[in-house]
Image: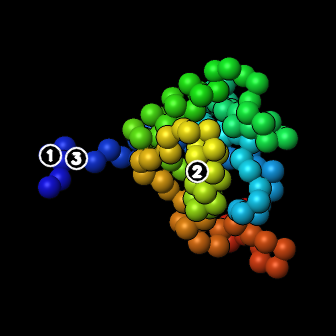
Amino acid sequence: MGSDSAPLPLSETRFIVLDVDVTGVDIRKDKATGIAILPLRGGRCRIADINWIPLAQPDGSPPVNSSWREQYRAMVDSAAANPIVTYNTRFVRRMIKCSAVLHDLPLPGGRWVDLAAIMGGAVGSENNPAAFPAR
């Protein structure tokens, strides 16, 4: 069963751009130290709307900021209502999950858009320049 209303155009859809700060890239031993989220509305964002949520201090101990749990829960609520855009969703979700389990927090749900999957070679490397045409 579908919705009776027409889907919103991308220009009217609200997205949450999400990135995770980590101690390294080893999914088994490294930890997330924070999450940055930036709402996109109508394809636009304001730098002032960036919200960084601490998950741990560099030594792994809980954040000093007493409101971090409330900030995290607000991010989870926002993620449930809006698509989340990130790069390498599997890695990002795994790092967030480890912190959520450690601190007894809910996991962000909702719809995730993985830029790594949809960019298909648009991001270059040393051996393979970006696929964007030169201007």
Q: Label for residue 97?
A: 2
Q: Give, as a three-letter code, the residue at label 1.
A: Asp
The image's colour scheme reads rainbow
* Up-down relation of residue 14 to residue 95 (above or below): above
Foreground residue, 69 or 103?
103
Amino acid tagged 2: Lys
Which numbered disc, 1 or 2, marks the residue that appears first in the sequence?
A: 1
Q: Where does the N terminus fall, quadrant-wise?
A: bottom left
**CA separation in Å, label 1 and label 2:** 35 Å
Let me know if residue 54 appears in the view. Answer: yes
Calculate the distance from the C-alpha at mark 3 to the C-alpha at mark 2.
34 Å
Q: Which mark is residue 6?
A: 3
Q: Of label 3 and label 2, which has the lower sequence position?
A: 3
Is 26 located above or below residue 22 in the figure?
Answer: below
Q: Residue furthest top?
A: 66
State the residue position of label 1.
Answer: 4
- The C terminus lies in quadrant: bottom right
- Residue 60, image x, y percentages: 79, 42
Percent of width and height locating residue 77: 45, 34
Q: Is residue 44 left or right of residue 130?
A: left
Of tags 1 and 2, the one toward the viewer is 2
Tell me the kind of residue under disc 3.
Ala
Find residue 38 and report its horizontal and vertical position in percent.
60, 36
Question: Looking at the image, is 40 positioned above or below residue 130?
Answer: above
